[in-house]
Amino acid sequence: MPLAPLDWSVWLSPWALGVFGLCIGSFLNVVIHRLPLMLERQWLHESAAQLTDAQAMARGAGVPLSDAEKLAKAVDVYGTQIEALPPFGISKPRSRCPHCGHQLRWHENLPVIGWLRLSGKCAACKAPISKRYPLIEAITGLAFAALSWRFGAQPTTLLWCGFVAALVALAMIDWDTTLLPDAINQPLLWAGLIAALMGWTIPLDKAVIGTLAGYLSLWSIYWLFKLATGKEGMGFGDFKLLAALGAWLGWQMILPIVLGASAIGAIVGIAMKMNAKLREGRYVPFGPFLAGGGLVVLFAGQQTVLGWLGWA
């Protein structure tokens, strides 16, 4: 007896995708917290490997060989300690309270509900749990439900869910650390191009031109600013993020995204400066505003956005 076809109207309904989004939001909280730490450990390990090569230090940095050998021996001790650290990744170790080390039970990890049941406090030590965790879960759940309304209960809607999830993770990681990891940026870009190639999102020519326009526009601004001031105005991760947005949304949306991100970023930066909340270096990361601009364009639609600019 042949299997009955899947009823996408049920499985990809706003309610179903909303619940799925809550679970993905819980996973994103883990990614946002752990991925930067994973990268830091990786960089430390790579740095230790480089610094223990006394010959390379002597050749490349002009350090006397005797001094390079002393440094190599000292670093080798720390490198051994780094290698001896317990495994740390997205799935290991299990989630724990950062204050007392209490290992979270399954019902304490339930999206939003777990936080509400605990009244926003650790079950063991009663230390407060940040409101950001349930907020990210709720935002992701609402976004997934909205995508079902926007695109309908069809398999390609799941692609846009992945797009939104990646933007949420990138925005929060950049806000916390000023990093836009290639581990998310690059797969997001290639997924956008592949989706266009398969005919699932936008025409391939618009995706390819959008990728080029996104990267080269910010790359050009970066070098003009650096040549004029001698300073770096943004990171290379911003170029890659805008390129990924171009791959998903098309070249016509690059300028609206940049304009919107710049305007909102300037307002937030001025507000933070007035409240003395700017971080060291007195700047605000640009990635969260690029991601926000991409989400506005996605949900508003191309024609609406072009209408706002008087280009429709």
Image: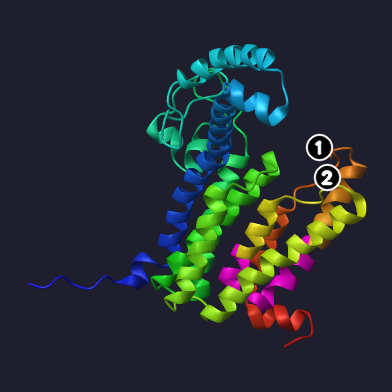
In this rendered view, identify the residue nearer to me: 217 or 90: 217
Q: Amino acid at mark 1?
A: Arg
Q: Is residue 69 magenta?
A: no
Q: Examine the rendered structure and indicate whether residue 201 appears above or below residue 218.
A: below
Q: Quadrant of the N terminus?
A: bottom left
Work out whether residue 77 or residue 180 is closer to the camera in this orientation and state it: 77
Indicate the position of residue 38 as horizontal and vertical percent values: 53, 34
Residue 142 in sight from this viewpoint:
no
Amino acid under label 2? Answer: Tyr
The crowd level at tag 2 (other Cα within 10 Å; few <14, some 14-19, many 20+) is some
Asked if disc 1 and disc 2 are in contact, CB closer than 8 Å, the reply is yes
For mark 1, what is the residue? 279
Quarter of the image for residue 5 reads bottom left
Q: Secondary structure at mark 1?
A: loop
Q: Can you say which quadrant of the picture contains the C terminus?
A: bottom right
Magenta-colored span: 244-261
Residue matched to label 2:
283
Q: Position of residue 128 (x, y in %)?
A: 61, 27
- Name the residue: 47% across, 37% down: 114
